[in-house]
Image (cartoon, rainbow, N blue to C red):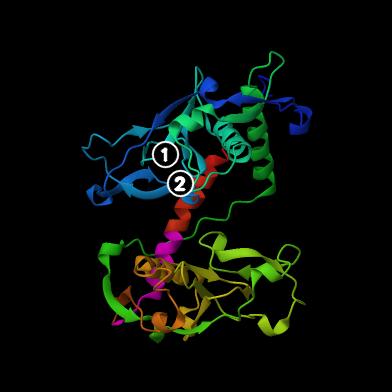
Amino acid sequence: MYTEEGIYLKMKKLSDKVWEAFVIGDIFEMMTGASISRNEFDSGNMPRVTASDNYNGIGLFTNKIKHKNFRVNDNFISYSFLGSAFYHEYNVSLDMKIHGLKIKGKNLNKYLGQFLVTCLRHTIFTPSYGNQISSKDLLTKKVLLPISELGDPDWDFMEDYTRNKLREIRKAYKIPQIHQIIDERGLHEVEWTTIPLNTLFDVSIGNNIDGNKIDKYTGIIPYITRKESNNGIDGFLNKSFDEKYYSEIDKFVITIGNETAKPFVQRYDFYTGTKVNILTPKEDKINNFYAMQFICEMIEKQKNRFSYSFSANSTRLKLQNIKLPIKDGQPDFEFMEQYMKRMENNVLEKAKKMFE
């Protein structure tokens, strides 16, 4: 808890609290999303929450549209039919099968919201496509929460606990400096052209290590697979595992899983799982982390071309074309770097506000 003078008093640990299971319908009110065809959305700034476990559940950004199923809410927790949970302080629109939760008789805030998201994720059995959670099902589920001396959910403890954790993170983590920007041009202010990937990169297949046959939990070297999150990292191996499989890099590379077609920039030595492609820059001027991130975004824009039956293998990637900004007829890597640094500055500014 905090005193009026703002001095923090030591709180109980999670293990010191008494916890109890509460029926979600007893403590939360619910709203639901609704289906709208993707082609009806306009590009804009309002997040649309879908059944995703990444990017806070945001599947796209849209302008407000006139549609009976377009519903907007803020300051609530979204919970998808597949078990993803996120707190949204801002206005968002919900897709079909995305449920919104607000505490009955109490306003949420970012501290309480984040605590509750963690509880929902860890105490409700993880659903699947064959075992989805409908709005009726969710209201009957139970969530484990710390309780007050009266036996009610201890909202104050939850809020103060998260506030304290963020305070500890703020003390331990130094937010990077904002980048100096010398090029403020937008994407529409530069010239673009189509460039074959194989003119920029050597494309090869990584060494296939079967993750089911190794210990990927006790090492320190990233193990890159076809995952679509966490930069493709699916564990960490010991360097002594087998050095013939070891990818020692002296420059940034891009990894792309065959079926997922999700590109990531790798900046450290790594091992690879099965069917992971490695794109190595042919020229040093490409060897820039931010320019490589920009190129990843351009590659990902064609991700929908690929599938399990038509995978992004090395043969197809060598024939792949992408659009890139150019200057004097050559790829404008300096613009790409500046643009991505501006995007990173936006994230850093939001991080600073989160810790305020």
Quadrant of the drawing holding the N terminus: top right
Q: Which residue is mark 2?
A: 57
Most common secondary structure along the magenta stretch? helix
Residues at discs 1 and 2 in contact (Cβ within 8 Å): yes
Residue 96 rendering spot, x and y as whole percentages: 36, 41
Most distant residue in the front direction:
130
Report the amino acid beneath label 2: Gly
Residue under the image location 54 percent in, 21 percent down: 27
The residue at 77%/32% (across/down) is 15
- Of circles 1 and 2, which is in front? 1
Residue 7 place in picture, x, y as percent = 71, 26
Asked if residue 334 lies in the magenta stretch, the reply is yes
Name the residue rendered at 54%, 33% in the picture. 113
Q: Label 1 sits on what residue type?
A: Ile
Q: Residues within 10 Å of mark 2 (few under 14, many from 20)?
A: many
Give the secondary structure at mark 2.
Answer: helix
Q: In the rendered image, is residue 75 in sight?
A: no
Q: Describe residue 14's horizontal placement relative to residue 319 as left or right.
A: right
Q: Earlier in the sequence, mark 1 or mark 2?
A: 2
- Location of residue 25 in the rendering, given as x and y in whole percent from the top left corner: 51, 23
The Cα atoms of the two marked residues, 1 and 2, are separated by 10 Å
Boundaries of the magenta span: 329-342
Which SS class for mark 1?
A: strand
The reply to whether the magenta stretch includes residue 113 is no
Indicate the quadrant where residue 143 lies.
top right
Residue most extreme to the left:
66
- Residue to which mark 1 is pinned: 98
